[in-house]
Amino acid sequence: MGTQAGSRGGRRSNRVLGTLFLGMFVMGGAELLVVGVLDVMAGDLGVSVSSAGALVTTYALGLAFGGPLLTALTMRLDKRTVLVGALVLFILGNVVAVASTGFGVLLVCRALTGAAAGLYDATAFAVALASVPPERAGRAIAVVISGVSVSAALGVPLGTVVGNLLARRVRGRDRARRRPGRGHGTGPLRAGGGRERGRPGPARVRAAGPGGHAPSPTEEPAEPGPAREHEG
């Protein structure tokens, strides 16, 4: 019985650590991914790259100051509730950031998501320590914190590549829409689907003068001479 209970406890603690690892992976990816697509975001927001760097700074400030403050305010609450609340706040902040087009709103969202990440990190460490025996505390902390390391090594490069590819595709579509169309003639449609070139109307057709010379718009047509009047 003791062996079965120990195995069940080990599986439960492994599931808890795996869940916390995934949460840290997401938090770390959202924190560091901005660095890889900073030039793309600066172009979309219409600001310089140095100004767009404030997105990294505001996240770090939210993590450093907002995280401990939220942790102190929620210290007596259930840890599972705090983790879920931190994830919900983090997701909402990112959704608003994606939907916004203003740089100021984006800065506020980055600060809020940084604070939510700080709250999640502190609570995740406490839950990890409580889910394992004291002799496995170091391993539990290492598993949780490795989520950020793995996101920096794998998630951020992959996200940077995907972000740049999507940005190029969107910009290509915008350029194609702005580029004037070809073959927009005013003539009737041909059998192949195109349009015939517009033919000059009757008002634009002028009879050629003597010698095949077409008179200019300001030139009056020459009157027929006496020799031509008696012909025929």
Image (cartoon, grey):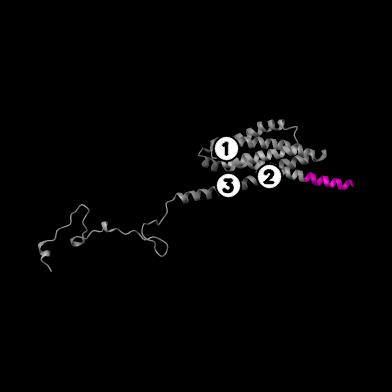
Res. 220 image quadrant:
bottom left
Where residue 176 appears, as percent x and y from the top left, is: 47, 51
Nearer the N terminus, badge 3 or badge 2?
2
Per the image, the residue denoted by label 2 is: 150
Per the image, the residue denoted by label 1 is: 106
Q: Which residues are magenta?
A: 1-14
Res. 59 image quadrant:
top right
Q: Is residue 205 above or below residue 84?
A: below
Label 3 to label 1, Cα distance in Å? Answer: 17 Å
Check residue 3 for magenta coloring.
yes
**For residue 66, side relative to residue 218 (left or right):** right
Label 2 sits on a secondary structure element that is helix
User: Comparing marks 3 and 2, which lies closer to the viewer?
Assistant: 3
Res. 192 image quadrant:
bottom left
Q: Main structural element of the magenta stretch: helix, strand or loop? A: helix
Identified by mark 1, the residue type is Leu
Label 1 sits on a secondary structure element that is helix
Please give the name of the residue rendered at 83% of the width and 47% of the height, measured from the top-left corner.
8
Q: Residues within 10 Å of mark 1 (few under 14, many from 20)?
A: many
Identified by mark 3, the residue type is Gly
Check residue 19 for magenta coloring.
no
